Amino acid sequence: MSMLERAWYRRRWWLWLLWPLTMLFAVLSASRRYLFKAGFKTSARPDGCFIIIVGNISVGGNGKTPVVIELAEYLHKQGLRPGILSRGYGGSATAFPHTVRSQDSAAKVGDEPQLMAVRTGLPVVIDPVRARGAQWLSEKHQCNVIICDDGLQHYALQRDMEIVVMDERRFGNGRLLPMGPLREGVWRLDTVDLILHNVQQFESARLLGWPRRSTPCSWRPVRSSVSRTRQ
């Protein structure tokens, strides 16, 4: 954990020195959301696909990957054709979209995409442009359910369901980047469909490997997706 990350969760006073940058981040983030909501920027999705976003409002790992794996395996057992979409963070690949293959190294595609491909045996595509990667999963792999690993703030990809995974660190000091760990304000949780609180120690999970079965301690339905249309 970096010095800045430690400061977020220990609420160091000197983080207030970053207040101007946080205000700039807040303005840019709000402006981007408004542009999509008002239709000045367009979002896209492949026809006939159900899109599930598994993400968080804070930076850092918090157990999203094992949730994606379990969800993909469950949907596959139900007779659906799920595919996994990832940005490929940490990988060196430069040509996108890229379908993760068994011979791909973690250095090329990223640790998490490689893990998800090996564990599930399902199509995993990396692409920083999520809408393009989703279209690739639909057209090239005939997926009818697409699970996006992270990307809660990637509004260019339309979605049908949003799942937020949180660990015991929750919101840290409750501040936006770079004063705190939040990509969006806590208010954003009121708009998602499900919050999964992972109470396992994150460092232990990293050391022991991803658990084969994730057991939530509680489920919190936030808002019914039946009564609204996602944009």
Image (cartoon, rainbow, N blue to C red):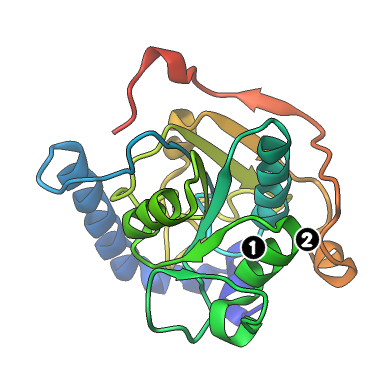
Coordinates of residue 28 in the picture (x, y in percent): 23, 59
Confirm or deny contact between disc 2 and disc 1 (CB under 8 A): yes
| Kind of residue at disc 1 | Gly
Above or below, 86 against 50 in this view is: below
Instruction: Check disc 1 and report the residue beneath it.
Output: 61
On the picture, is 16 further left or further right than 165? left
Instruction: Kindly state the secondary structure of the residue where label 1 is placed.
Output: loop
Q: Nearer the viewer, residue 50 or 149?
A: 50
Could you say where residue 43 lies in the image, as x and y percent from the top left?
A: 24, 45
Q: Position of residue 172 (x, y in %)?
A: 60, 55
Distance between mark 2 and mark 1 Cα atoms: 8 Å
Q: Residue at x 76, y 60 (%)?
A: 119
Q: Residue at x 53, y 68 (%)?
A: 13
Question: Pointer 2: what residue?
Answer: 202
Callout 2 secondary element: helix
Q: Earlier in the sequence, mark 2 or mark 1?
A: 1
Three-letter amino acid code of the residue under disc 2: Phe
Indicate which disc residue 127 carries.
Answer: none
Q: Nearer the viewer, residue 92 or 151?
A: 92
Name the image quarter holding residue 27. Answer: bottom left
225 over 172 or under it: above or below:
above
